[in-house]
Image (cartoon, rainbow, N blue to C red):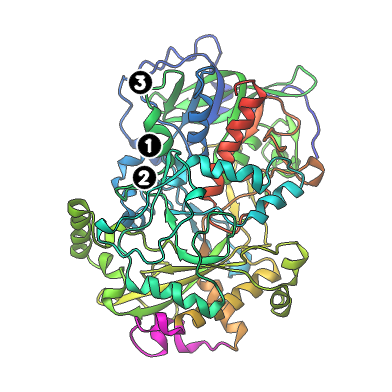
Amino acid sequence: MYQKFGRVVALLSLLSRAKVSFAAPIEEIEDKAIEDEYDFIICGGIVNNPQLTGFSSMSKSKRLNPGGTAGLVLGNRLSESGANRVLVLEAGPNPEVVSAYEAPGGNQLLGGTAIDWAFLTAPQEHLDGRIIQYHRGRALGGSSTTNGLYYGRGSSSIYDRWEELGNPGWGWNETYPLFVKSTHLNPPSDQQGFDLSYKTWDESAYGDGPLQLAYQGYVPESANGFIEACEAANIPIVNDLNSGDGVGVKHGTGTLDSKLRRSSSYDAFYKPIQDRQNLDVLHYAAVQHLITDTDGEKPAVTGVGFIYHPTGLVHEIKARKEVIVSMGAFHSPQLLMVSGIGPKSELDKFGIEPVLFNENIGRHLNDHSVFSIMAKAQPEFATSEMSATFMNLRAAQNEFYANLSGPYTAPSGITNGFQELSNEELREIGAGDVVDAGLVDQAHIEYLYESIWYPGGPTPYYTPKANESYISLTASSMVALSRGNVTLRSASMADAPIINPNYYEAQADRAIAIQSFKYLRKILAHPALSKYTDGANNGEVSPGAAISDDDDEAIFEYVKANTIPNWHASGTNRMLPLEDGGVVDSRLRVYGVDNLRVIDCSILPLLPDVNILGPVYMVAEKGAEVIREDWNDA
């Protein structure tokens, strides 16, 4: 619950020492035509890594470079009618500084680059203290510029459950049209020379929106074998997974244009409207705090403070209508907390003067995690050879850029199968809490086919070799019950928050991991897939014969050593009724504070049974829709 306090002076020490005023903050920024006030300010990025300031300064021409995945959609839609002036503040670089972001095969090469935050988690108690790298996009377009390209929507029941939790207007019937609105599917053509098997779709599920979708180009035969082998896990082959039935298997839709280039929110929602005169975006502007006025009955956000890194100067800008925080599951709660809005313990710990206490900000972090088994494959049926040597990678890139062909036309894996377990099976394996939580009529486990060794690096059981080829089968629970948190490292946005996903804290998560390991082996052993492997035990080398199917303890030890994030962090500013632990209401307004909304993955009240890119685009479309309704800008 929240309580109201007096006027906030909880600025960072840097900001409190700086001579900042609304009178003339922008005159210092000589190369941008930025105004003192905007109708809407979208906070789309911050800096807590000094590497971001190493890029060249902006040109003196007007450059509109919007922020993260949701922020770009908001900037586009809120400036669409021409009735509002919109400002997006973004700290990160243009994603094109790492040109590999554009090509499907380049998604293997983005970790640790200038467009990756490369966060580290807190030591994971239930993973034997492991600290895990957590990739998040830090370019214009956010994680849509760095992710694995898979686009999905999940089961209709998830969104109906959102509505049942106290969020009117968020059921499937209301959200499905927004999924359709934002997307456009580029059908595959046999003229491209690629295998079209299992690349099917429901035409009515896609519209004529900015976000381009397509199927990967090159498909190794083993990927089709995986689809057929999912029969071993009772997963049906389906026509489309984006029409509300999230259970089944086929080749997945990717965020790719007709030329098989990445279609990120930067490409889809920024480039077509880059000359729109009522949308400004200040590049390399690191948001530091929210400006709050507490003279009224409730505190109200009136603007934001930021550091403009090319000059190092601190500035503030007013919002005539609203400030929208769109910085993701880690940075959005961090910005609220350093601005005095958050749990009492966090504010007290760092001497931040409180504006409002809400104990749920930064809590309830929910994420999908993944682990894999790996098998040796015959070289022609995997793509791991492509990146095994410098010469191989260069040849694959040359083929892609010259002819739009070869293995570089495909990400490592967007062929996914989604399995629903019966209530009886869930209870039998010790995951009855999933049933009790109402997580039924949906996918429970996602199985991913990877035509490479994934994740990279050796395991305790095998070290991959440059002269061998591999495939990996990966499992991810879609009903993770474990909850973690995001807490402050300091009172400054310059320091990354402490990220604790708390993987496998829940017993049901452990039970599902063990069961999914056994299903991975059944899929690998199916003749439709095993015929492409090389060696004994269906080619399995990690963990291989050292672990038997009836040794649950050994299986879970392997899982713990091999688990990484699935990069779907959410829930740290949940959209729920306040009395049920909410931070924002069904119109995405922060409880107890006027003129402030949060619109990004942090508001998801319940993780969808799918990768969250598609749902985040929908949330942004919905957010823009309700804002325009509230301000009579239909």
Residue 492 is at least partly visible in this image: no
- What's the magenta region? 525-549
Mark 3 neighbour class, 10 Å CA radius: few under 14, some 14 to 19, many 20 or more: some
Image position of 527 (left or right of 358): left
Q: Nearer the viewer, mark 1 or mark 3?
A: 3
Residue 481's disc is none
Instruction: Farthest residue to the top: give it.
Output: 23
Viewed as shown, does residue 283 lie left or right of 230? left
Magenta-colored stretch includes residue 541: yes
Q: Is residue 504 visible?
A: yes
Residue holding disc 2: 114
Query: What's the amino acid at mark 1?
Result: Pro
Pointer 2 or 1: first along the chain: 1
Q: Which comes sooner in the sequence, label 1 or label 3?
A: 3
Nearest to the observer: residue 414 or residue 48: 414
Nearer the observer, disc 3 or disc 2? 3
Which numbered circle lies on residue 93? 1
Percent position (x, y) of residue 352? Answer: 68, 33
Which residue is at a point 51% across and 26% down the rendered structure image? 306
CA distance separating discs 1 and 3? 15 Å
Please state which amino acid type lies under the numbered disc 3.
Lys
Relative image position of residue 151 (x, y in whole percent)? 47, 53
Where on the picture, by quarter, is residue 536? Answer: bottom left
Q: Is there a contact, CB below 8 Å, between mark 2 and mark 1? A: yes
Q: Nearer the viewer, residue 359 or 351?
A: 359
Type of the residue with mark 2: Ala
Other-residue count near label 1 (Cα within 10 Å), few / some / many at <14 / 14–19 / ≥20: many
Residue ID for mark 3: 62
Q: Residue 470's spot in the image, x, y percent?
A: 34, 75
- Residue 11 placement, left or right of 558: right
Q: Please state the horizontal and vertical placement of residue 25, each as a whole percent of the image.
A: 49, 14
